[in-house]
Structure formats: structure tokens, C-alpha cells
Image (tube, rainbow, N blue to C red):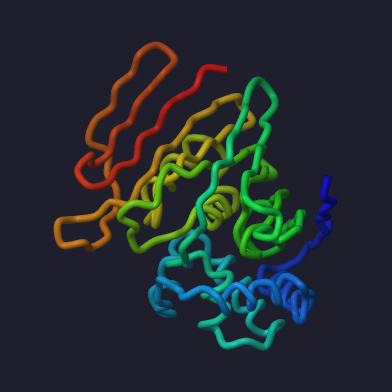
Amino acid sequence: MKHIYSEIIQFRGSHYDFGNYQGQKLKDSLSVKNRENQWKVRTPRFSIDIGEAKQAIRAFAPGVWEELLGLQDGLEWPLERVLQEYGGYRVNIAPSGCSVLAGENYIIRNYDYHPKTYDGRFLFFQPTDQGYAIAGPSQRITGRMDGINEKGLVVAYNLTNRKKPGAGFICSMIGRLLLESCEDVTEAVEMAREIPHRHSFSYLVYDGDGEMVVIEASPVVSMLGRQRRARIISTFKRGKIAFISMIPKNGWIRCRKMPI
């Protein structure tokens, strides 16, 4: 069996200081060099709009934008490059086949990506300016593949498909936004309704009160191909299982309440 490792990082401070700290540690690191090598054989299928990314990120978690500015200073990179690598907005992801097993008081994750695609970093971050403390593995530095916050909210996700991607956040950044800003399942569902989604993913959210919901999300695209915010159009309830269907034409978000 091939051995891999994950660096354990703890930090308490502002989002900017955390970003700056990470940037200094990342400078000339294997993680950065691996990413540079990947771009030698890949052509980005997206563009970076700094103003659009700033507006989108600050609308949901302003501290994450400050962390990106800290990364910029720590790495001494142009902001466009920081957003391309770690911004989590308008970024494509590779195919995956991950899975989640959850039950009373536990959640188990399986990752089917190759280890070289991971950051190899498990973070304990307690911000002192805004947002909840989070423990979890990072993805693209600022994102979280899954994790738990100080309120006991757990988030994990699985790929559905990458058909008809929209302008919006990728899965790892959505995981970070939910953990950063939400206290329970209710708040997570509400934020998922507002967040613009780039790809179709299922997000499992499980809170400290034992509520568990699977949020099935997809980009919501109009006939003109412009991004729109999601809105609930119908709700169906059967016992302990609830379905919330949202704009089924071209894109949707649906929540399934899971019995534990």
C-alpha cells in the first residue's frame, strides 16, 4: 500500500492572517509545484473575473475573501492567479466517485480521487474576526471537502454530474461556506438556496440536534444561459422524509430529510 500523509495545521486569528500564514507555508511547496505541472498539460476551461468573484464570495462569507487576500500577500502572487488556484469560483473539477455513510452520531467518507489531487492538509481554524471554527480537510486550500464546525454542523458532498455547468461556486468552496456561516440544517438549506452552483452535487448536512438532510443541487440556468438564484416552488412531506423541489426546468435544488 502506498503511504500518503496529511499535515495537521492549527491556527487562531483573523481570516487575512490565516491566509497570509498559509501562503507563506505554500510558497515553493510541493503542492504548488504539482499544480504548476498540472497546468502544463491542461488548458483552463474557465475565466477569472476578479470583481464577480469578490462580489459572490463576500455575499456569503466575507472572511473567505479576506483569506484570499492574505494568500495573495503570503504567496506574492497576482490576485487573478490566487483566484484561479484557490478562489473556488468558476473553477472546473475532475471526475470523482466519492461516497458517504452516515448514521446516528457518525459520518464516514470515502474519497475516490487520486491522492495527488488532494492538498494533504487537515485544518483546525478558529477565526477571531467572523465565522465559525471549522475542523476538516482542505481542498484547493480555501475549500473544505467535508468537516465539522463549532456548532456541530457536519457537511460532506458527492458528485452528481458536470453537465451544463453554470457560473458559481464549486463543491469544495460551497462546503466551506456552509461550515463557515451555518449553525444547523435549516440555515444550511437556506444558504444552499441562495448560493450559485457551478456543478450538480449532493450535499449531506447533519447538525448537532440530529437533523440530517441531503441537498441535491444543480446550476439554475435560464433560457438565455444566465445564472439565476433558486427559489422553492413546491414542498412534499411524507412522514420523516421531506422533498423540496426547486425550478425543475434546466436546473434545480432538492432537499431530502433522512431518517436516522
Picture quadrant where residue 150 is located: top right
Picture quadrant where residue 152 is located: top right
Quarter of the C terminus within the rendering: top right
In the image, 224 versus 118, the foreground residue is: 118
Check the image and report above or below for 256 versus 230.
above
Q: Give the tally of numbered discs.
A: 0
Q: Position of residue 42 (x, y in %)?
A: 51, 73
Check the image and report above or below for 171 versus 119.
above
Residue drawn at x 55%, y 51% is 181
Check the image and report above or below for 12 versus 24.
above
- Would residue 120 appear left or right of 149 to someone viewing this image? right
Question: Residue 66, can we see it?
Answer: no
Question: Residue 111, can we see it?
Answer: yes
The outermost residue toward the left is 223
- Would residue 258 appear left or right of 119 to someone viewing this image? left
Picture quadrant where residue 19 is located: bottom right
Residue drawn at x 58%, y 69% is 86
In the image, 148 versus 201, the foreground residue is: 201
- Would residue 220 appear left or right of 125 to someone viewing this image? left
- Would residue 195 appear left or right of 126 to someone viewing this image? left
Residue drawn at x 63%, y 22% is 103
Quarter of the N terminus within the rendering: top right
In the image, 113 versus 72, the foreground residue is: 113
Q: Position of residue 220 (x, y in %)?
A: 28, 51
Q: Position of residue 196 (x, y in %)?
A: 37, 56
Residue drawn at x 61%, y 26% is 209
Q: Position of residue 223 (x, y in %)?
A: 14, 56
